[in-house]
Image: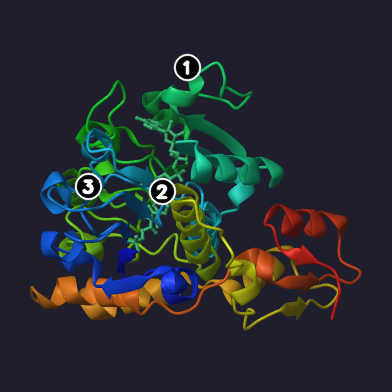
Amino acid sequence: MKIVADENIPLLMECFGAMGEVVALPGRSISPEDVQDADALLVRSVTKVSRQLVENSSLKFVGTATAGFDHIDRDYLASQGIAFSHAPGCNATAVVEYVLAALDILAERDGFELRDRRVGIIGKGQVGGRLYRMMERLGVDVCACDPLLESNEDSRDDARYVSVDQLIECSDIICLHTPLTMDGPYPTHYLIGEQQLRAMKPGTVLINAGRGPVIDNAALKQCLSERDDLTVVLDVWEHEPDADPELMAQVDIATPHIAGYSLDGKIRGTEMIYKALCQHFGLPARVRLPAITPLPVLKQMKFSEGTSFSTTCSKAIRSVYDIRRDDAVMRKGLMGAEEPQRRLTFDRLRKDYPERREFSTLRVELKNCAAELTDVFQALQFKIGDEL
Ligand SMILES: NC(=O)c1ccc[n+]([C@@H]2O[C@H](COP(=O)([O-])OP(=O)(O)OC[C@H]3O[C@@H](n4cnc5c(N)ncnc54)[C@H](O)[C@@H]3O)[C@@H](O)[C@H]2O)c1
Ligand SMILES: O=C(O)[C@H](O)[C@H](O)COP(=O)(O)O
């Protein structure tokens, strides 16, 4: 079997090496010639899997080790009988932790308590659903907009669903977690445009960790030049990897599409397409990825009695993931850089992203601390107790 794969898929050789020839290539440059005689193509989000790439190839399987699949022409693959698989939810926890890490920094900077804010989540799927439940457990007032979920009797739950307009009207913090869609009953392209931006309450925090074009970036730039009360966190940008440096200068936290980049989430993505490929070709899935996942650098933190509530949570969150580093590195690398350097740097920051682990890899010891603190750490998915 010949497998062509994005070189940025972690544990590629460990998983697929024994199956045949594995050709690892930069995702953006995978060409029709590369896949012509391949049996399987494994990508991440930067490879456009279009008719033009795939036609005249011998491909039987395409897998993307990502949650999103707007880079895949699934209709064309289906028309050619080419199987397709993605990795739903693989990095949802990482994105939720990205949102929490951003809110932790902003709460300290702007002097607010998350519990005093209403959070509105647009797109309540793998990411938005986890975020919704976490906010509930943290005692935060939360509502969601997801007309597809709401209108589906099988998936509807007792969450508080509202329309986009209602959500914008009532939320202090707006989190975007929809896929990018151009058609269907509820397309998300430019879901947040001039009108929605204008309607946001004074002081709204807007976070986009879904896909760049869900916000009209030109409208956002214009809006931010007119009102300075909005706080914006952008992980995703229109025209990636060409993130607009002027917009970057206007937003409060800027990162290069790494919200889902925990090592745990990336490895889960590899594991999901590995299993799907094995199933498709009738091969045994022998590799056990948890067994070859590295141990976290930081395994345990102990807090002294009397440490304040918010200091304790912030210290734990920032020890695992300090989003300020990602923001600083992006600004340093991209501000003032010319094309094509800017695009190259955006991609390099993603390729060389340092190891980041999920909260659940850190054990937190809370001797003689308030029970409420234990509840909060549990809600955030940290391990509790002294095992070492
Ligand atoms: N920044 C990152 O690193 C990163 C990581 C993971 C996922 N993503 C992006 O985030 C998206 C969401 O991820 P997910 O894993 O939760 O996907 P998902 O498919 O599980 O959930 C998406 C939800 O959005 C809802 N939705 C669709 N159109 C909508 C609309 N017009 N208004 C409101 N809701 C709508 C769907 O019904 C669904 O419940 C992915 O498609 C991907 O593009 C980004
Ligand atoms: O859709 C996803 O899963 C994410 O956007 C993913 O983290 C993108 O990462 P990439 O495939 O570009 O490495």
Instruction: Name the disc covering residue 86, or none.
Output: 2
Disc 3 residue type (three-letter)? Leu
| Residue 166 relative to residue 132: left or right | left
| Residue drawn at the location 20% of the way across and 43% of the way down | 216
Which amino acid type is marked by label 2? His
Image height check: is 80 above or below 237? above
Circle nearer the N terminus (3, 2): 2
- 159 sits to left or right of 304: left
Q: Nearer the viewer, mark 1 or mark 2?
A: 2
Please state the horizontal and vertical placement of residue 366, each as a whole percent of the image: 84, 70
Distance between mark 1 and mark 2 Cα atoms: 24 Å
Is the shortest distance between ligand 1 and the CB of mark 3 under 8 Å?
no
46 versus 362 height, above or below: above
Q: Are marks 3 and 2 in contact (CB under 8 Å)?
A: no
Query: Would you say 19 lies left or right of 195 here?
Result: right
| Residue 220 image label | 3
Disc with the residue nearer the chain's start (1 vs 3): 1
Which residue has dot 1 on it?
151
Q: Which of the 4 quarters of the picture holds residue 219?
A: top left
Picture coordinates of residue 286, whole percent (x, y): 59, 65
